[in-house]
Image (cartoon, rainbow, N blue to C red):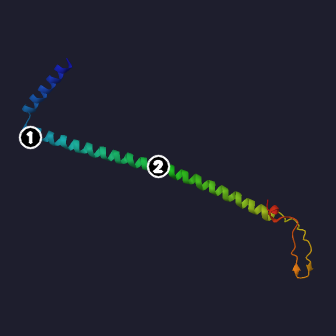
Amino acid sequence: MIHKKDLCFFELRALLERRLDPNLTAEMSLAKAIIRKQRKQMQALTAEINMNIYDLEQKDIECNKKQQELDKSKAKVVVQQRKYLNLQKKPLPPIAVKSMSCTGSKLRVFKPTLPLLQMFN
């Protein structure tokens, strides 16, 4: 049934094309060609727009990652600055120094009783 309808449609179309004016047929062919060309251009532009949107999304993701890295680095710097400022505010513990003595040709250098590394921990 559908096949018969298709055949009738094609026959009717062919019959109408034969009866049409040659100028009208040429104009219709030209219009079809223009429409095909414009459709191809639209498809190309759509593909280009989609590619640009994808690139923009990728750059946005990369920008967000870089911003997160920057925020982490800033947080680390702030923590280090606070530690440094806290060390500066902390009074240094007194260091007991043994007296220096000189016996013969040997000079004894003072030795602190509190190791220096313990002061900064």
For the point 13% across and 29% down, the residue is 13
> Considering only vertical position in the picture, is 74 above or below 102?
above
> Considering only vertical position in the picture, is 103 above or below 5?
below
Horizontal placement of 74 versus 33: left or right? right
> Considering only vertical position in the picture, is 49 above or below 112?
above
The answer to which quarter of the image holds residue 12 is: top left
Q: Which residue is mark 1?
A: 23
Residue 64: x and y, percent? 54, 51
Provide the secondary structure element on which disc 1 rests.
helix
Crowd rating for badge 1 (residues with CA inside 10 Å; few <14, some 14–19, many 20+) = few
Residues marked 2 and 1 touching at CB (< 8 Å): no
Horizontal placement of 54 versus 65: left or right? left
**Residue lying furthest bottom:** 105
> Considering only vertical position in the picture, is 73 above or below 88?
above
What amino acid type is highlighted by mark number 1? Asn
Q: Which residue is mark 2?
A: 58
What amino acid type is highlighted by mark number 2? Gln
For the point 61% across and 54% down, the residue is 71
